[in-house]
Every structure is written in structure tokens, then in C-alpha cells.
Image (cartoon, coloured by chain):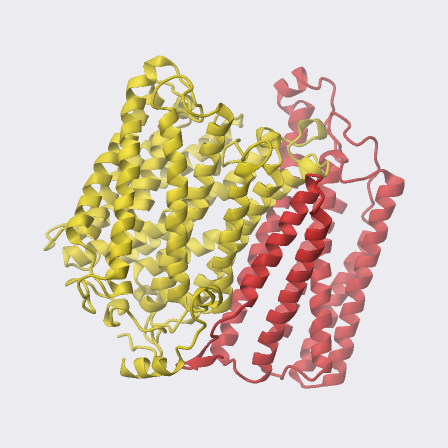
Amino acid sequence: MSEAHGGYYVPHGTYWPIVGSIGLTTLLVGVANFLNGWNAGEALMVAGFAIVLFMMFGWFGTVIRESESGMYDDQVDRSFRWGMGWFIFSEVMFFAAFFGALFYARIYSVPWLGGADPGTNEFLWNGFEAVWPTNGPGDVGGKFETIGAWGIPAINTLLLLSSCVTVTFAHWALKKNQRTPLVLWLLATVVLGFTFLGLQIMEYMHAYHELNLTLGSGIYGSTFFMLTGFHGFHVTVGAIMLTVIMLRSMKGHFTPDHHFAFEGVAWYWHFVDVVWLGLFIFVYIL
Amino acid sequence: MSTATTHDAHHEEHPSGLMRWVTTTNHKDIGTLYLLFSLLMFLVGGAMAMVIRAELFEPGLQFVEPQFFNSMTTMHALIMIFGAVMPAFVCLANWLIPMMIGAPDMALPRMNNWSFWILPFAFAILLSTLFMEGGAPAGGWTMYPPLVMQTGNAFPFLIFSVHLMGISSIMGAINVIVTIVNMRAPGMTMMKMPLFVWTWLITAYLLIATMPVLAGAVTMLLTDRFFDTSFFNAAGGGDPVMFQHIFWFFGHPEVYILILQAFGIVSQIIPTFARKPLFGYSSMVYATASIAFLSFIVWAHHMFTVGMPLTGELFFMYATMLIAVPTGVKVFNWVSTMWRGAMTFETPMLFAIGFVIMFTIGGFSGLMLAMAPVDFQYHDTYFVVAHFHYVLVTGAVFAIMGATYYWLPKWTGHMYNEKLGKLHFWLSTISVNVLFFPQHFLGLAGMPRRIPDYSVQFAGFNEISSIGGFAFGLTQLLFVYIVFKTIKGGEKATDQVWEGAHGLEWTLPSPPPYHSFSTAPEVK
């Protein structure tokens, strides 16, 4: 099926990409149908999601089997590292778009509506005062309260920062080939990650039910939920990845000097952590 | 090379028929898929352009409803940018980068397959919107809110097809970077790489930095429409202009994503037919990098008229003009390469010289547009349309066609028909100028873009432009004929193909073996 070319591993033919394309397309067409209020939406979404999951199990499974049977040399390892690094950079730029929206709203659009740009204030919303947080001159979504930085968000910051320490301890253990501490530190990281998610869900429920802070609460609600929501999604993905790494460690995968998957997941986890720090500062504190 | 051929004879087992193309991880197969896909999209997008030119042939409404006309301009742009030009460059990257740097294949072959096989699905979704209630998207490819919010059922399909194109581009770009940094043959240092490889490396960085921003922007459109957010709604504290800032932060680097590799192609072709090494290689590399850097700090020159602080207008005006400096370096380098060279004018060289001249015309009209006070008059007129078609058609598309003629003999092992190639060039060059040059005058006279009907004083130039448009469209059928005829057969091509060609790809047989370099070549 596959073989090395001049030392470099070139796989021969794979069905997983086309399965992935069909799955992604089914999923997205399903979501689009659902949003348009058409019938087939939910069924297509479920089917598409199932196909994507099937593809991920199959594709990652193939790569793990090949890796464990020693088919990847150092050059392949480097390719994976560069690939993961630039993938994370693309994720950073995705978040940059939403941070950009937050900064633009706070620095430009809200002050302009409040009179820094005389025209809009005078003719459109005379008397609107620029403050942050705001749901805009139209009071979109009605009165709301915000979530303070020093309650759950501060605890969540501590959780994520600690999880970065524990994942590093796990890495040290792996490099010294101490398997039990490796699994235990990974377990601690996974627990911290899912605890973060649980608290985040509690915070969202609190916001929706008691504070009237929703996705529809003007520009504040939009930026708050889109930023923290996409971050929460990435934490979910990261925590699942950590779980997989933990299960693989328990099965005896990885060696002290050959463990790209572990490092890739650890990088991803640190990226999620750094984004959170940005959120904590710019969304919650300031 | 003998090792490579015996090696392949044993292992060239892949599923036959359609499944070979669906499952392939080979950079040449994937390159071919990209080439055929982009050719198909070029024809689909071109057919839409024909509808536009037919409607504009004379004032009044002739053939199509205004709404459908606007769908045509929107879809034409999306298909040509994301379906024709970008995949054509990815085709060239796949075919050429491994051969140029002495690698067996791309670094991540399975992901390479996926980045292609997402595209047919993305465009099937986009084209399906033509048959939906409310019609295909008609608010322009820039998708400005609040107009785009009036799109009918097509709206979520538009957003998701853009997401899929973005995923495909990002995976393709990651693959290019990893291949270039990790797969070079021993001795192939960065500053020895062919310029085409350099320009693709820099473009790949632009893609990774900007495609996610576009994904973010269209995601905000989606949530504004369906989930009550207020990103682009002033009543909620947002701002429709904010979309334009986010969009053009992607959009301006995007236009360099469409042209930098064209610079690379021309820098390969001209030295071959001038029989001289490229003049100022390192300055070309630095100029490309400078253009890429500057592309991130000029985006608001697309929005001089939307309302921006004066400081902003000045900053973006001067930053934009600064781009003329590295671009000028390139143009002078190409001319200096030709200076006192032993030149011959085969079809690829004709396209390359045509590129240098007509891209420069587009560059100059770009400089005019860069001046904020002047842009107040030109904004959203046919002058803008003329400008970007000069850089994208006589620029990017001409370079792609030149590249096709230049490397097709290497890929297929057959020479194309030189007479037909030259005929294709001259017919294209004459008709494309008849098509787009009068649009400068239309724009200066005040004809707005994206309208199906116009005031009678614009009739003459529009008629000329439409005639040029039909001629250019027909001429491209000749191109399709030449390409397929060359694939099927023709005079045998030598390994070096062109007398003055240098570089690793010309040391391989024509057509090259399935895995380009099984043993890494030594580069001195």
C-alpha cells in the first residue's frame, strides 16, 4: 500500500479525503437547510457529522498505525511539526478577526455613535452616550448585566494556567520514560480542561437566565459570546485531543524521543491557553 | 534516473479509472486535477462574463433581469478568483515545486488530496445557489452588509462555500510551506531556489494569515443574519463599515495571492528565452517579501469613500503608493534581464512580455486609484473594473497561460503547436485590450460598475468593449483545444525542452517519472 521514497514516506492512495469532503459537505448543506427552515436539515446535519467523525477515526487511526509501526522518519516528523505550527497560526488569525471586531467596536464604532463622529450621533441617535459595555443606541436585546472578571472567569484562568503546567509535567515524564506519572499528569490536564468547560457552561446559563446577556445583546453580547464561544469550542477539541493522547499513553504509545502527536496536542493546548489570557484581559477585565 | 524508473515500474500500483484520481496522493495527479478544475471554472466564469457583456452591449435591458445580472457579476468574481486563478496556481505549485527543489513529492500528500477534493464540493454548493429561490448571491463578491443580508435562500450556502474554499486554501498553503522548508534537496539553499518557489512560499504565508480572517468575517455575517448578533448593525453598536475593514484585511493580501506567483512564473520564463540569468535575483526575493508585507497595511484604500478619519486616508494612500517601489524593482529587473539577451519569441515568452507590459498598465491605473482625492471620483466606476482586469487577466491569467505553454511539454512529453500558440497569444492580446481599455474611459466619464443598464452616452465604448469580450471569450476555446491536443499527442519534447532552460525540473525526463526525485539530486 505505501512505501518510502528515497527515505521519505509517500503514502499511496487514500479514501479518507473524499469521505471527509462528502461528510463536510453533507454537514454544511444540512446546517444551511436547517437555517433556511427546510425539512431535511437535521437529518443531513446528523449524517454529515457522523461521516466526519468516521473519517477522523479512520484517518487518524491510519496515521497512528503507521507511526507506531515505525514508518515515519525524522523528516516526516519535521513535516508534521511545521504543518501543526502553521495550522495553529491560522487559528490565531481566525481569532484575530473576532478580536479585531471587538477592538473596532470599542475604539471606533461605539464612540462614533456616541458623538465622536458628529453626523451619526446628531441625525441617527441623538443623545446616545458611548459607554462600554453597550448593546447600542437601539438597546438591542434589552437591558443586560455583564459577568464580572473575578468570579468564575478568574477561576477558569487559574484552571487553564494550571493545566498548562500539568501538561508540561506530563511531557517531562514522557521524556524520562516514566509512564505512570505521564498518564497521571495527562489525566489531571484532562480533568482541568473539562472542569473549565463545565464552569463555562454554568456561566453561560447564568448569563442567559439571570443577566439577560445573550448573543443578541448588541455588540457586547455578539463579541462576548462569539469570542468565548469559539474559545470554548477550541477547548472542547483540545480536551478531546488530550483524552486521546492519554488513552494512547495508557496503551504504551510514544517513546521518549518520538512523540509528535503528544507535542502537537500540547502546542494546541498552550495556544488555547494564550487565547484565553487575551479574552480574560480584553473581554472580562477591561 | 535509472533507479527512479525501475523503482516506479514495481510500485506504480494505484486503482485505475476514476478511483485513481479520487484517491491519489501523487503531486502530479493532484496538479493535473487542479489544472482541469481551474480550466472548467475558467470557462464557467467566462460564460458568466459573456452574459454580462451581452447585456451591456447596448443601453436598456436586453437579455436578463437586473437581479440576475447582479448575480452574474457576483458569481463571475467568486468563480474566477477562488475557482480559476487560485487553483491554477496551486496546480503549478503541485506540479513544479517538488520537481524544482528536488523532492519526491509534496510533504503531506494525503492532505494535498483533501485540499483539492474539497473544491468541487465547494463550487457545487456555490453554483447550486443559481437554482434557489431568491437567486444566486447578487450583492457583489465582497459581500458587503447590509446588502448581502438581502440574499435569499442562497445566503447560508454562499457562506459555507466560502468556508470550504478557505479550508482548502489553508491546507494547500500549509503543504507548500512544509514542502519548501523541509523537502529541499541537499545543497538547495533558500537563495538558490527558483523564484517561482520563492513567490509561492511568500504567497502561502499570505494565505495562512488571511483566509482565516475571511472565514471570521463571513461567520459574523452568518450570525448577524441567523443568530441575532449585531456586528454590522449600528443600532446594536456595531458598524457595517467594520465588515469592510475585516474583509479587506483579507482582500488586499488576497489580490497579491493572485499575482505574486505570476511574478515568479515570468521570472522563470524571461531568463530562458533571453538566454541570460535573471537580473537581480536577490532583489526579486526581497521585493516579493516587501510587497507581501505592505499588502497587510494598505487594505483601506478599497474604502476611501466610506468615511474614515483623514489620518487614515493619508496613511493608506502613502502606504499604497509605497508598493510601487518593490513592484518597480521587479519590472526593471525583467527588462534588464532581456537587455542584450539572445531573445527568441516562443509562445511562453510572448505571454511573459505581454504580462510585463500590460501588468504595468494595470499597475499605473492602480497608482491613480491609490490617490485618495482622485479615488473619490473613480470609486466604484468602470475605471476600477478596467484596473483590476488589467492586473488579473493580462496579469495573472496571462502568466498562467504562459506557464502552461512553458511547462506543458515537460508534463506531457509533447510539444504544443507553436503556430496555434502564437495565434492564441495575438488574438488574446488584441481582444483583451479592445475589451478592457475602453473601460478606463467609461469609468473616467462616470459609468458605475455593477449595473445592467446605463446612460446612452456610454453606448459606444460599451459596444467596443463587448465585441472585444466576445472575441476574447471565443479565443479561449482555442486555448482549450491546444491544451487537450498537446495532452493527447504531438511532437516529442526533449528533457530540457527549451534551449535556454535551467533548473532541476529540466533534468528529469519529459514526461517526468511518477515520483519526481526518488533519490535527492545534489545541487552545487
* One can see residue A259 in this view: no
x and y percentages locating residue B121 in the rendered image: 53, 52
Would residue A5 be found to the left or right of residue B480 on screen?
Answer: right
Q: The yellow chain is which one?
A: B
**Residue A121's x, y, as percent?**
67, 20
A214 or A272, nearer to the observer: A214
Asked if B214 appears above or below B240 in the picture, the reply is below
Residue occupying image coordinates x 73% and y 75%: A246
Name the outermost residue toward the top: B456
- Quarter of the rendering containing residue A104: top right
Asked whether B116 or B57 is in front, the reply is: B57
Q: Residue furthest right?
A: A210
Q: Colour of chain A?
A: red
Q: Quadrant of the C terminus of chain A?
A: top right
Q: In this view, does A14 lie above or below A152?
A: below
Q: Which residue is drawn at 61% across and 77% down?
A: A64
